[in-house]
Image (tube, grey):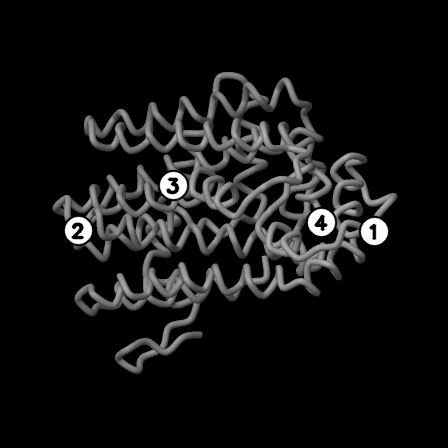
Amino acid sequence: METDRAGQTLTAAEIFDLVREDLRSVEKAIDIEAVASVETVTTIGKYLQQSGGKRLRPALLLLCARFSGGGGQTAIQLGAVVEMIHAATLVHDDVIDVAQTRRGRPSANVQWGNHTCVLAGDWLYMQAFHVALRERNFHVLDLLIGLTQMMVEGELIQLDRIGRIDISEADCMELVDRKTACLFTACARLGAVAAGSASAAEDKLGEFAWNLGMAFQLIDDLLDFVSQEDTLGKPVGGDLKEGKVTLPLVYALEKASAEERGLVEAVLRDRDYSTASFADIYAMVERHGGVQRTRERAQNFTDRARQIVAEFPESPYQRALFTLTDLVTERDR
């Protein structure tokens, strides 16, 4: 719970209550739109929808639409679009990462195999664009095409860096931008578009959401080190095991000894913790300030997001956006 600048408070439940009915309508829209002529695709879509996601992205879109004074059915349809795109990225990510779990359950690729899941993800992408096309709004399509290209490029860049220890802070920030922040930005902009906002207001909401998304992903990278598996819904230490060097480890490696770097290189090489234990890696990251510095970096983005929201006219939706920044940085999953 966070006290805003007017002294009033909002909880996570109160934030989502503001758009709860709209979120229910988004769920119904996904139920309808994610039905394919091939039953397996429909089954995978429903499996993902029922996996307990927080629906943060459509909620952000709906809050931005309401904040901007409108939204209606257009916002609901676009909320379904961004959630379907997000689901498609998760399916493809799990295939690329050879993931075993997602949100505490077997990942889709474990259940149905890589070939089927790649095609199901493709279908979800195309269906999302099919739904968006009904709005007959070129700006909406521009935002979604740019978003998709950014995320695909991010995956390609990440693949090129898999297994490498020579990753810089700038490298990490580029991936955070392309894989997460750009989707948050698109959600906010689409909410503004659904409400018919002027371009300046859309830009401002986009800037707010970009900072929110950067903070969200940095906390996600941090939780891979500090969370518990039953809380996170996937194995801790999974990023490094998959060959990914994220910001907490980048910061720690700046001060690491040759022996400590050798432990990290062993995990990157072996893709497991048989030579170096996760406990040893985590202790090294904590000892050299990787956890604290990443948390501070995320807080910087959060602070900037709050500064932007504080410039908006006060309303229940402005207060919700203001409080949303703390929910991102204080979450445990």
How far apart are the alpha carbons under marks 1 and 4?
A: 10 Å
| Residue denoted by label 2 | 201
Mark 3 and mark 2 residues within 8 Å of each other at the beta carbon: no
Q: Secondary structure at mark 2?
A: helix
Residue 35: give x, y in percent of width and height. 46, 26
| Amino acid beneath label 2 | Ala
According to the image, label 3 marks what residue? 182
Looking at the rendered structure, the kind of residue marked 3 is: Cys
Q: Give the residue at x 75% y 46%.
A: 264
* Mark 3 or mark 4, earlier in chain: 3
Residue at 50% x, 50% y is 217
Front-most of residues 274 and 288: 288
Task: Give the mark toward the camera: 2 or 4.
Answer: 4
Q: How far separated are the C-alphas under marks 3 and 2? A: 17 Å
As drawn, which residue projects farthest toward the right?
274
- Disc 2 to disc 4: CB gap under 8 Å: no
- 2 or 1: tag closer to the N-terminus: 2
Assess whether mark 4 and mark 3 are in contact (beta carbons under 8 angstroms). no
Label 3 Cα crowd, 10 Å radius (few <14 / some 14-19 / many 20+): many
* Sequence order check, earlier mark of 3 and 2: 3
Q: Provide the residue designation for mark 1.
A: 277
Say left or right for 237 vs 312. Answer: right
Residue at the spot 44% in from the left edge and 32% down from the top edge: 151
Q: Are marks 2 and 1 in contact (CB under 8 Å)?
A: no
* Position of 147 relative to 114 (above/below): below
Q: Amino acid at mark 4?
A: Gly
Could you tell me the amino acid type at mark 1?
Ser
- Number of labels in the image equals 4
